[in-house]
Amino acid sequence: MTTTTYSVPNISCGHCVHTIQTEVADLDGVETVTANAETKMVEITFDAPADEAAIKSLMAEINYPVAA
């Protein structure tokens, strides 16, 4: 099990938080997703088959790209 925290500058409100948590939680292997609009951070706990590349790709796809 891996837990990673990402900076996501596009988070601005509760709707953003809900969208991220709902969409990322649907990825196979993702256990928990916690997004925070105040800190603009997302913490994700996952295991295979999910990986960082798949998570980052999905985040970009839903218009919440992870900061470089």
Image (cartoon, rainbow, N blue to C red):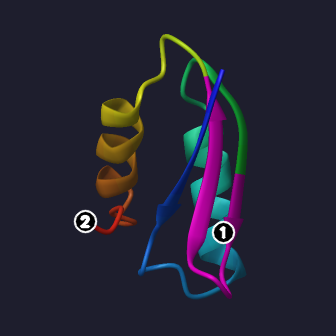
Image side of residue 46 versus residue 53, left or right:
right
Does dot 1 land on a helix, a strand or a loop?
Answer: helix
Residue 58 to residue 65: above or below? above
Residue 38 to residue 28: above or below? below
In the picture, the quarter occupied by the N terminus is: top right
**Residue 45 colored magenta?**
yes
Image side of residue 5 versus residue 35, left or right:
left
Q: Which mark is residue 59?
A: none
10 Å crowding of disc 1: few (<14), some (14-19), many (20+): some
Are discs 2 and 1 less than 8 Å apart at CB?
no
> In which quadrant of the rendered view does residue 39 lie?
bottom right
- Count the marks: 2
- Residue at 25 percent across and 65 percent down: it is 68
**Residue 18 or 6: which is nearer the viewer?**
6
The amino acid at mark 2 is: Ala
- Residue at 56 percent across and 42 percent down: it is 24
Q: Which of marks 2 and 1 is nearer the N terminus?
A: 1
Does dot 2 land on a helix, a strand or a loop?
Answer: loop
Kindly identify which residue carries mark 2.
Answer: 68
**Residue 64 colored magenta?**
no
- Residue at 58 percent across and 70 percent down: it is 41
**Residue 4 or 55: which is nearer the viewer?**
4
Q: Which residues make up the magenta segment?
A: 34-46
Depth check, mark 2 against mark 1: the one in front is 2
Image side of residue 34 versus residue 30, left or right:
right
The amino acid at mark 1 is: Val
Residue 43 to residue 63: above or below? above
Q: Residue furthest left?
A: 68
Image position, residue 13 (x, y; %): 64, 86
Q: How far apart are marks 2 and 1 (CA)?
A: 20 Å
Image position, residue 38 (x, y; %): 68, 88
Kindly identify which residue carries mark 1.
Answer: 17
